[in-house]
Amino acid sequence: MSQKYAQLLEKLHTINDVEKSIAVLGWDRETYMPIEGNAGRTAQVATLSAIAHELSTSDELGDLLAAAEQEQAGADYDSTPASMLRSVRRTYDEQRRFSSEFVKRSSAITGAAGAAWAKSRQDNDFASYQPHLEAAVSLAQEFAEILGYEDEKYDALLSQHERGLKTADVRRVFATLKSETVPLVMAIGEKLDAVDDRMLKQDFPIEAQRAMCHYAAESVGYDFKRGHLGEVHHPFSTSFGRNDVRITTRFAPEFAVSSIFAVLHEAGHAMYEQGVAEDLDRTPLGRGTSSGIHESQSRLIENQVGRSLGYWQLHFPELTRHFPKQLAGASVEQFHRAINKVQPSLIRVEADELTYNMHIMLRFELEQSLINGELRVADLPEAWRAKMQELLGVAPKTDTEGVLQDVHWSQAAFGYFPTYTLGNLYSAQFVAAAKQQDSSIEADLAKGDSTRLLAWLHKNVHQHGSKFDPAALCERATGSTLTAQPFVDYVREKYGAIYSL
Ligand code: ZN
């Protein structure tokens, strides 16, 4: 390895070690830390974050970067050094645009907005939250102006989560998704009683859930030698490097099925991180390339694998072994229908695979209007209700069940929501491409075996870490840019069969 590039790498390793230490502290906060530890932990994280920010915006890093760029000028575009330098240059230039005054002000605004949001949600009191949300919207607008954009302001926000993707691209694929799946949801709405999911609404012993969740994570290929399953209120996964990627779930007696699907979801995220090539570890490329691609991996395992009939034909005996009383007399076909019940509802995080995207399209449309200044924050609750009616045929009676349900906007995280649905679309496109490229994958999945699919994902997605932007990765893996069609085909076939449409 060349000398200048090696020097840069050494510095990147240091920055990475600080960032991953922050992640360890964060994981501990959510799992084992006693409640009184919070103030001390906040200080520790703030100190390490300041160190990481200083290191990653320093003149010294800039000099190392410039020297390495000169040395590696002829490197092949696909090579690790060329990809590394592209990525580091982009982040470095971006971060240097934000003054420490802006960074400080932004954490003060979002900190206050977060607290106001939690209280107003509890009290169903949008008015007290409104000034905080107005400040968060202005902050996001300012952020976009500092970062710059070619076509529209929202592009700058979107690109923070989905590098290189334009708002117009998302509008185009979402338009197809909307016109193809809203009628499907409405048709299912006429036959809601066709699927009975009462078997899922019982008390399931937590000890048995724990065992089943462990089994489920292993069944899809999550590596426990390089992982760990923890227990939290809001499930997440976190990576400290490819050899230590942890997942979490939530256990409550009435949540047996959701704890299992949360584990499958987080295992999908985690296997992406566990699959990153070894030479990218401890560098900025040693992680998933975007929120949307990350979400594609979790949703692929949770839905395309975990909610398939083939998967449960193989694993239902294990499930009934853990819950003999609850599932007595239930067939695997009945269980498969129950876990795929479609139900237009008010709350995003409780939505099924099909109606979930409506919740996202609603947020995507409202976010653009807010950022463009076409919609006033004061008019947001009413706009929310109207869009819910249009997309799902239901509308919330309270703001707690409407506009106040998500934390994201109080964090000024505009541009993030669309990545959930992009994840659904990418996941269907990946599975369709994998089946097309290797015909044995379809037969394997029908038998509940996802080993070969995982190998395909490893080769085409996981190992690359962040070497390629999402659009480039998608095109390399599937031969085409993102389209809604594979997802539309998938849900038509699946729900057409379940609901006899
Ligand atoms: Zn996720």
Image (tube, rainbow, N blue to C red):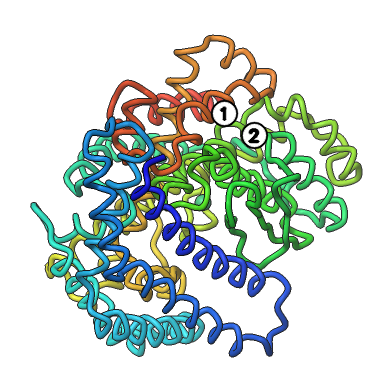
Mark 2 secondary-structure assignment: helix
Identified at 48% across, 55% down, the residue is 345
Mark 1 secondary-structure assignment: helix
Quadrant of the rendered structure where residue 180 is?
Answer: top left
Q: Position of residue 286 (x, y in %)?
A: 48, 47
Mark seen at residue 498: 1
Foreground pick, 351 / 133: 133
Residue 348 drawn above or below residue 116:
above
The N terminus lies in quadrant: top left
Examine the rendering and report whether any part of residue 364 can be seen. no
Q: Are marks 1 and 2 in contact (CB under 8 Å)?
A: yes
N-terminal of the pair, mark 1 or mark 2, is 2
Foreground pick, 418 / 52: 52
Residue 366 drawn above or below residue 316:
below
> Label 1 sits on what residue type?
Ile
Mark seen at residue 161: none
45 to the left or right of 398:
right
37 to the left or right of 105:
right
Outermost top residue: 439
The residue under label 2 is: 337
- Crowding near the residue tagged with mark 1, few <14, some 14–19, many ≥20 C-alpha atoms within 10 Å: some
Identified at 73% across, 34% down, the residue is 219
> Label 2 sits on what residue type?
Arg
Identified at 78% across, 46% down, the residue is 214
Residue 108 drawn above or below residue 388:
below
Q: Position of residue 47 (x, y in %)?
A: 49, 82
Q: Position of residue 231 (x, y in %)?
A: 72, 63
Identified at 44% across, 26% down, the residue is 492
Foreground pick, 416 / 396: 416
Separation of marks 1 and 2 at Cα, in angstroms: 7 Å
- Crowding near the residue tagged with mark 2, few <14, some 14–19, many ≥20 C-alpha atoms within 10 Å: many
Residue 233 drawn above or below residue 138:
above
